Amino acid sequence: MNILVEANNLRKHYGSVTAVHDFSHRFAPGKITAILGPSGSGKSTTLAMIAGLIEPDGGIVRLDETDITRMPAEKRDFGLVFQNYSLFPHLSVVENVEFGLRVRGIARAERRRRASAALEQVHIPHLADRRIHQVSGGEQQRVALARALAFAPRLLLLDEPLSALDAKLRESLRVELGRLLKQLSLTAIYVTHDQVEAMSLGHELIIMRGGRIEQAGTPLEVYTRPATPFVATFLGSANLFEGECVQVNGQTRLRLPFVELPAQEGSPTGPCRVMLRPEDVEIVADGEGQLRGEVTSSVFLGSRACLTVIAEGCALAVDASNDAMPSPGTLVSLRIRHAKLRIMPKGE
Amino acid sequence: MAVTVALMAVILLPLFVVVLGSCVNASLLGLSTDLWSGSRHDIFDFSAFGYIFENYGDWALFSLELALGCVAICLLVAVPAGYALARHPFPGSGLVEELVLLPLSLPGITLSMGLLAAYGELRGPLLVLAGHLLYTIPFMLRVVMATLRSFDVARLETAAQSLGASLPQRLYLVILPNLRHAMMVGSLLVFAVSWGEFNVSFLLNRGRPQTFPAVLYDTYTNQSIQVSSAATTIFLAIVIPAVIAIQWLGGRESSDMEQGA
C-alpha cells in the first residue's frame, strides 16, 4: 500500500502564463499530503499532472521509481475525487461505484461485492440502488469517494472534495474523511484552499503561491515556522513587522518599532521581518507587560475575541478570551511570548 | 386557458376535417358530391385508402426508406461530429456549426438549384437523399451538441478516465448512454423533417416514385377531396406519433436534467 510518489521539476505553461514552476516533492508514503494555496496558485494543475489528466511541459512523475510522466491517466490506477463529484447521471449509486471494476473486467458478482464494501466504508450502503439525482450533495461526495476507493487505487487524489458543501456538512465530512484515510493508510494528495482542512487532514502540508512551492513541512512546522511572510499570513492570521537584529553587549536583541526584545539564538543581525501570531500576545495586569497600547476595536468571535491594539503607532492583532473583552479606548498592558516570534529574512 | 383552447381549435380543426373528409360521406349532409367518390348511400367509406395504397404504395415506401436512411446516416455522421465539435472545439469550429445550420435558412428551391448545378448528373433518389441530409443533419447535430454541453461531457469523461476507462470504454459506457435521449429525439426529428419534405424532393427527383408529400400534391390537384384527404390522413398518421414522441421524450429529458447530478 505504501507507494512512493515523486514529482520532479513539474512545469506547465498556458500560453505565456506559467501555471506551475518546477514543482518537486517526494510524497510521504501512506500519508496524506495537503496542497494548500489560493486560487490560481497552481495546486489543481499540479494534481492534474500527477493524475495524468494534464501533460506537463517539463519534469517527471515517478511512482515507485518508475517514470509514469507519459502514462495515460486510465493506466495509472489512481483514485480521483473531484469538487463537483462528476458522478455518472445514467447509473445508479452502486453502478457508479462499480465503474472502475467494470472497466477492469471484474465479474458482476465480485464487483457488486466490492462496491457494496466500499459503500459500507462511507456509510451509505442503504443508498445503493438510488439514482444519482435522488441523493444529496454530501451523499454524492460519499459516492464519489466510494467510487474512487472501490478498485483499490495505488494513490488517492482529492481536488477540493468538500468545497461544494455547506460549512456544517463540510466539517463533519472532513472529520470522517480524515478517519477513513488514516485507517486505510493510503498515500493521498489533498488539494484545498481551506487551511483548516489542510491542517487537520494533512500529515504534510505544501503551501503554493503563483505556481511555486512556498514551503513544505508538517502543519505544526509550517504554522509555527513559516518560511515567508506569505505563508505566515495565509496560514492563520499574523502580525508582520519590519525589525532589526542588533548586537548589544554580546547579546542579540530584536528591535521592533514598539518594543525591544531578546532575539532567538542564532538570529543573523541586520534588517528582518518578524511574524507574531495574535495568540502569542497576552493581555496582562498593568506593569507586567513589555508594552502598553490602546484598544481600538474589539470583535467577538464566539469562542474568543479579536482585538486591535495600537502601540507606539503600530497596530497589533491580539487574541483575547471571550470573558475579558476590553472595550475600545481601554489602555492595556501586553506581553509578547518572544520565543514564538518568527524572524524571517527581509526581501519579500 | 381559453386562448390555449382557441389556438388548439384553430390548429386541430382543419386536421380533423381532413381526416373526416377521407371516410365520411359528406353528400348525405347535402354537400357537393364532387367531394365524394365512394358509395352514395354509406355513411363511412374507406375505399380511398385502398386507392392510395394501390396507386401510391411505392411512393410511401420510397419516402419511408428515405426518412429511415436519413436517420441512419445522421446517427452515423452527426453524432460523432457533434461529439468532436463539443469535446474538442478548434478555432473556427463555431463557424462550422453555423455552416451546418445554413441550409435550414435557405429556400428549398435555392438549395435544389445549387445541388443540381453541382451534381446534376446524379439527379434522382441519390440527390434527393443528399438534399434531405442537408436539412436533417443540422437537427441531429444541434440536439446532440446541446445535450453534450448540458451534462459537461469533458467532466464525465475525465472521471471515467481516472477510473481506468479507455477511450472506447468511455464512449460506450459514458458518452453513448448519456446521448440515448438526444439520439432518439434527433432521430424522430430527422424522420419527421424528411417525411414531410416536399420542395427538394420534388425538384431533385427524376420520374417515379416520388416522395409521399408529392402524393398530396398529386391527389389534391387531380383527384377527389376524399382521395386527397385519405392521402393526408396517412401522411398525418405517420408524422403525428413522431411529433408526440419528440414532445414526450423532450419533456422527460429536461426533467432528468433539472434533477440531474
Image (cartoon, coloured by chain):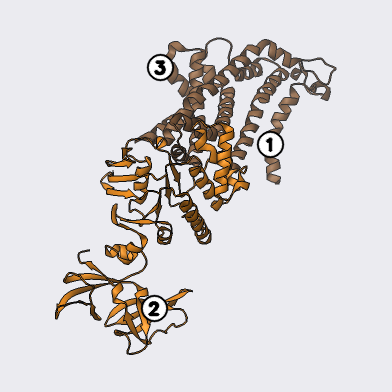
Chain colours: A orange, B brown
- Residue where numbered disc 2 is placed: A307
Image marks 3 and 1: residues in contact by CB distance under 8 Å: no
User: Which residue is more in the foreground, A187 or A158?
Assistant: A187
Give the side of residue B12 with respect to residue A306, left or right.
right
Q: Amino acid at mark 3?
A: Ala
The residue depicted at 85 percent of the width and 17 percent of the height is B41
User: Which residue is more in the foreground, A116 or B236?
Assistant: A116
Q: Amino acid at mark 1?
A: Val
Give the side of residue B258 with respect to residue B107, left or right.
right
Q: CA distance from mark 3 to mark 2?
A: 83 Å
**Secondary element type, mark 3:** helix
Residue under mark 2: which chain is it in? Answer: A
x then y, percent, for residue B83: 45, 32
2 vs 1, front mark? 2
Of the 4 image quadrants, the one containing the C terminus of chain B is top right
Location of residue B237 by image quarter: top right
- Residue where numbered disc 1 is placed: B10
Residue under mark 3: which chain is it in? Answer: B
Tell me: residue A46, above or below residue A203: above
Q: Residue furthest right?
A: B41
x then y, percent, for residue B203: 51, 17
The residue depicted at 57 percent of the width and 20 percent of the height is B68
- Residue where numbered disc 3 is placed: B118
Q: Residue furthest front?
A: A2
Disc 3: CA contacts within 10 A as few (<14), some (14-19) or many (>=20): few
